[in-house]
Amino acid sequence: MRNLFFLFQREFAAYFKSTMAYVVMFFLFAVTGLIFWIRISSLNNPQAPPTEYPMHFWFVWTLMFGLTFIIPAITMRLLAEEMKSGTIELLATAPVRDCEIILSKFLAAFAFYCVLLAPTFIYVLLLRENAKPVRPDMGPILSGYMGLLFIGGFFLSIGTLTSASTRDQMVAYISAAMAIILLQMVFFLRNFIIESEGWKKILRPFDFFDNFQNFGRGVIDTRHIVFYIAMTALLLFLSVRMLKWRKWRV
Amino acid sequence: MIRVTELTRRFSGVAAVDSVSFSVGKGEVVGFLGPNGAGKTTTLRMLTCFLPPTSGTAVIAGSDIVSDPLAVRRNIGYLPESVPLYTDMRVSEYLGFRARLKGLSSRAARDRIGRVCEQCGILSVRDRIVGHLSKGFRQRVGMADALVSDPPILFLDEPTSGLDPNQIRDVRDLISELGKEKTVVISTHILPEVEATCRRAIIIDKGRIAADGSLDDLRSGGAKGRRLVVRGKGAPADEILAGLKSLEGVLSADRAEGGFEIRTERSGEAREAVFKLFSGRGWVLTELSGGRNRLEEVFWRVTGFEIGKSARRRGDRAAGPGEEGE
């Protein structure tokens, strides 16, 4: 626990020393700001149909465009950099467990992800301020953020695993982005290609757009939460195995 | 302090380290010698619990590297070969992180960092960013990291590579000083380094231990007695050889390059005897030297390197096959 804290501290601080962090921030705010602007324009259009969930559109598009490209950028350096520079040898010969290394790195990435998401709450405040006298329902918005955190955590664990699998950050980035895009494909597969109901059912837990429908509408389904936590834990476990297996290649 | 038993590591079927066994006592400074690729780094990585061994084990400071790696890691300081460091941190910040990770309280960490910075000569760069430091300073930061938790056992992998002669001397002095109270294992292929800092050497070649002993034992090559080289003329070589063999106190005499090599019980008396033999029979003594085998020769011998062979090979390349022949 103590080690976890020191490792986390160093890892989290390292984010703010890299240019990448600021590039990622800029990119995320540009994309989410644009999506928000499109959203507001459509809300202001008198011909547009009324909506119960004004932020839902923003959440879904942020998930689709923002996170696909941003999450791999957050995680790509986690272990790949340590493998490349050899610092993994220092870390793994200090009295710390491999699982503490992986978990601290994941938590640092998750904390940085929260830091990235936090300022987007301004959009919610702007919406509240400008929608007066109507007040948007905060429930679905908060549960939407919750969905972003769980799904984001799952994506971050994918990135942790890809970063543990290579010493090349670019390979880690691309393979994580590809994995996330493949997961997005599940939505298209289920809705437009697969006809068999059986397959649709099997793939359902992996269709995070479908899962997000609930989060974005204020429904907190524990099945989804358990699913994302379990998947995250599984991927982190695989990352620990990967780290053990890869040490001899350093 | 360190007891290694049948330690083996295979990489895809090939044994990088093959049933290596040795032990190192408390306060010993041991040179771990071998050509590049002999398995030195792999052995150190197993002893520092970075790599698990394929078979065999080692007990370090009372803990087993396989069953209790965390306890082993608490008792060791390790300087890896390439001196990896977090280049985005400041020196003091980096050492602080490492000290806390190794279990020091924040207060103890502060004290120790001051001490090791002084010992390693990096007080002047404490607040600099590691990535901006020169190779020599980085090496010393790595050394400070290995020392920061004041471990009883140190593993140093090529501690002087890339340093200038002054820095090399500083590091050697530091190692000698540390050797007074700590057990130190230095992996290197630089022989003068071992001669300067260690009393004992373990030579490893192709994953196996080729020689293990005190430097004096190794230099004498395991053979008894001290070595003397004799060169002279005035009689057929066989006659001189027979004369040398007949001397009192000479254990053995053989022909060597351009002369003779004898092993004696006491070199002082033997020198006199040799001189008297030559002058008594009217031969000319052109050289009487020797004493010790150089460690380099021991290294060549146990790692299967033949001087003549390699010279010829080089000659082949330069002069072409037609010129060969003696």
Image: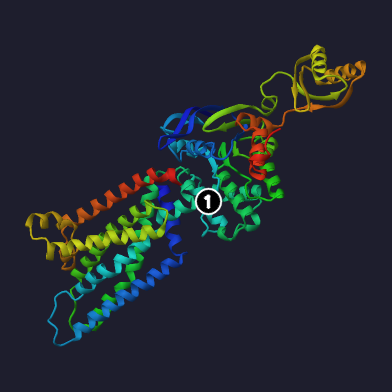
Q: Percent from the top left, x then y, of residue B189?
A: 62, 39
Closer to us: A105 or A205: A205
Q: Residue at x 90, y 20 (%)?
A: B283
Q: Percent from the top left, x then y, of residue B117?
A: 62, 51
Q: Residue at x 18, y 73 (%)?
A: A137
Which residue is denoted by mark 1 in the rendering? B84
Question: Which class describes the residues within 10 Å of circle 1: few (<14), some (14-19), or many (20+)?
Answer: some
Q: How many numbered marks does the figure carry?
A: 1
Closer to us: B50 or B34: B34
Considering only vertical position in the picture, is A28 above or below A211? below
Q: SS for tag 1? A: loop
Left/right placement of residue B215 relative to residue B64 reads right
| Mark 1 residue type | Pro
Quadrant of the image occupied by residue A130: bottom left
Regarding residue B109, the answer to whether it shows in the image is yes
Quadrant of the image occupied by residue A153: bottom left
